[in-house]
Image (cartoon, helix red, strand yellow):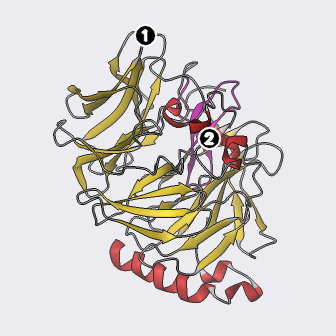
C-alpha cells in the first residue's frame, strides 16, 4: 500500500433493525477505521470526498472515499500521523493534520505534502487518549486560518496559522488546551476547552477578549464536556453529563437547557436546525432533535451498536474530581455522529462488527421503514426543509 493507491469500493448496505433506516458501511477492511472527531467535518463542502482514517497499512493514515465512483484512495504516508488532528479544508483543496511535531497539509489532487510549521520536539500532544490528548485541530470556514494546540513541557499554546502565507501566532497559553473550534460564521472567534475545572473558553483570533464563559457547579462535581458552536448565534452548546445539553451564550453567560437526556457527542447541522447525538448509559442509539426547542421530540435514526468503551462515563458526575488520571477510552469505539454539509447524511463510526468501520445513513423519510415514520415526519420534514432553505 502506498500514497495515492486506489482501492475498490468497500461499501455495503444493510437495514437498521431498530429504526428501519438504510445504513451504508463505507469501509470493510479488517483494520481500525474512523472519521474525524464529532465537531469536525468529514467531507469537503461539495461532498466530493468522504475523509477517514484507516489503519490498514499498519499505521493510521488518511484515506478518502471518492464520491463519484466509491473508490478509496490513500492520502497520507506518515509513520507519526496524529489520527485525530485531521481536518479537510472546506473548499476541498487540502487536508490538514499534525504528524510528530509538524503541522502539515496535503494537496488532495497532487497529494504533495507541505509542512507549515515544525516545533522540533518529539511530539506536540498531551499524553493520553481523551480530551486535549487527542490533538484535534480546526480550520476556519473561509479556509484562511488553521488553529491547533501545541503542548511542550508543562504549557499548552494555542497557535493560529495563516494558511495563505504560513505566518503563525501564539494567541494564548494554558496548562491544557483541547478541541479548538472556529466559529462557523465568524473566523475572528474561536472556542477551546481548558481543564475540567475551567472548561469553556472563547478568544479572538488575534488573542484579544479571552474569557471563561461558564462557571461550573463545583459542589455538584458538574461535568462540562463536548462543546460546539451553534451556527448563526453566539451560543455554545455543551453536554452536562449525563443530564443533557445546555446552551451558553458566549457574550452574556446566559444558559438554557436544550435537552434533558443522555446526549453524549451532540453535533449541530450547518444551518442550526438539527442536532444529532449518540447516547450512553443506556445506549439508545443515534437520535435527532431540534436545538431550537427546549427538550422537544427526539427521533431514533439508527442503532450503531458500538462498544462505547470508557468506564469513566459510568459516573453521574465528573470523574476527574475523584482523582481519576488514567482513562482507557479508545475513541474509535465511539460513534461520534456528524452531519454532511448538506444536512442529509450522517456519518458515524461503529465497531459492532468486531472492528471499527465508517458508516453513513441518509436522513430522509424515504430511507426509513414501516412504523418508524410515526413521529419522525414532523421533525425530519421541518428540519430538512430548514437545511434546504439555508443551503439554497
Residue that appears at 61% across and 68% down: 261
**Residue 188's x, y, as percent?**
20, 47
Residue that appears at 26% across and 34% down: 163
**Where does label 1 land, which residue?**
121
**Where does label 2 land, which residue?**
319
Indicate which label's residue lies in the foreground, 2 or 1: 2
Question: Which type of secondary structure does the marked residue at label 1 adopt?
Answer: loop
Task: Indicate the quadrant containing the C terminus: top left, top right, bottom left or bottom right.
Answer: bottom left
Q: Which mark is residue 327?
A: none
In this view of the protein, which residue sits in the foreground, 110 or 28?
28
Farthest residue, direction front:
219
Residue 192 visible in the current orientation: yes
Residue 310 visible in the current orientation: no
Residue 373, image quadrant? bottom right
**Residue 20's x, y, as percent?**
75, 76
Q: Is residue 18 above or below residue 163?
A: below
Q: Is residue 300 left or right of residue 3?
A: right
Q: Is residue 347 above or below residue 293?
A: above
Question: Which type of secondary structure does the marked residue at label 2 adopt?
Answer: helix
Check residue 67 for magenta coloring: yes
Label 2, label 1: how many angstroms apart (C-alpha)? 31 Å
Q: Which residues are magenta?
A: 52-77
Task: Indicate the quadrant containing the N terminus: top left, top right, bottom left or bottom right.
Answer: top right
Q: Is residue 360 above or below residue 207?
A: below
**Residue 239's x, y, as percent?**
51, 56
Number of on-image labels: 2
Residue 254, image quadrant? bottom left
Residue that appears at 63% across and 43% down: 34
**Residue 215's x, y, as percent?**
37, 49
In this view of the protein, which residue sits in the foreground, 273 or 63?
273
Amino acid at each position: 500500500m502506498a500514497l495515492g493507491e486506489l482501492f475498490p469500493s468497500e461499501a455495503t448496505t444493510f437495514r437498521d433493525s431498530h429504526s428501519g433506516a438504510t445504513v451504508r458501511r463505507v469501509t470493510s477492511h479488517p483494520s481500525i477505521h474512523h472519521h474525524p472527531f464529532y465537531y469536525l467535518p468529514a467531507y469537503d463542502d461539495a461532498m466530493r470526498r468522504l475523509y477517514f482514517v484507516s489503519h490498514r497499512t499498519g499505521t493510521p493514515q488518511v484515506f478518502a472515499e471518492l464520491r463519484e465512483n466509491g473508490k478509496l484512495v490513500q492520502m497520507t504516508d506518515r509513520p507519526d500521523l496524529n489520527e485525530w488532528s485531521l481536518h479537510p479544508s472546506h473548499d476541498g483543496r487540502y487536508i490538514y493534520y499534525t504528524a510528530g511535531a509538524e503541522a502539515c497539509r496535503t494537496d488532495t489532487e497532487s497529494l504533495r505534502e507541505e509542512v507549515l510549521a515544525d516545533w522540533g520536539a518529539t511530539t506536540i500532544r498531551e499524553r493520553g487518549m481523551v480530551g486535549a490528548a487527542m490533538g484535534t485541530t480546526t480550520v476556519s470556514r473561509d479556509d484562511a486560518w488553521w488553529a491547533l494546540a501545541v503542548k511542550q513541557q508543562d504549557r499548552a499554546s494555542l497557535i493560529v496559522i495563516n494558511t495563505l502565507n504560513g505566518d503563525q501566532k501564539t494567541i494564548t497559553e494554558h496548562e491544557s488546551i483541547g478541541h479548538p473550534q472556529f466559529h462557523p460564521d465568524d473566523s475572528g472567534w474561536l472556542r477551546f476547552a481548558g481543564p475540567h475545572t475551567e472548561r469553556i473558553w472563547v478568544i479572538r483570533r488575534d488573542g484579544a477578549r479571552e474569557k471563561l464563559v461558564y462557571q461550573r457547579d463545583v459542589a455538584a462535581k458538574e461535568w462540562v464536556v463536548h462543546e460546539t458552536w451553534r451556527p448563526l448565534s453566539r451560543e455554545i452548546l455543551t453536554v452536562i453529563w449525563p443530564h443533557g445539553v445546555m446552551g451558553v451564550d458566549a457574550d452574556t453567560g446566559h444558559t438554557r437547557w436544550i435537552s434533558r437526556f443522555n446526549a453524549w457527542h451532540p453535533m449541530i447541522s450547518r444551518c442550526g436546525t438539527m442536532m444529532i447525538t449518540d447516547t450512553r448509559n443506556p445506549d439508545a442509539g443515534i437520535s435527532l432533535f431540534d436545538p431550537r426547542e427546549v427538550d422537544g421530540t427526539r427521533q431514533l435514526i439508527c442503532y450503531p451498536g458500538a462498544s462505547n468503551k470508557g468506564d469513566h462515563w459510568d459516573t453521574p458526575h465528573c470523574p476527574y474530581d475523584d482523582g481519576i488520571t488514567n482513562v482507557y477510552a479508545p475513541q474509535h469505539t465511539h460513534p461520534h455522529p456528524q452531519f454532511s454539509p448538506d444536512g442529509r447524511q450522517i456519518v458515524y463510526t461503529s465497531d459492532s462488527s468486531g472492528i471499527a468501520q465508517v458508516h453513513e445513513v441518509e436522513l430522509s423519510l424515504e430511507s426509513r421503514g414501516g412504523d418508524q415514520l410515526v413521529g419522525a415526519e414532523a421533525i425530519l420534514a421541518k428540519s430538512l426543509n430548514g437545511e434546504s432553505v439555508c443551503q439554497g
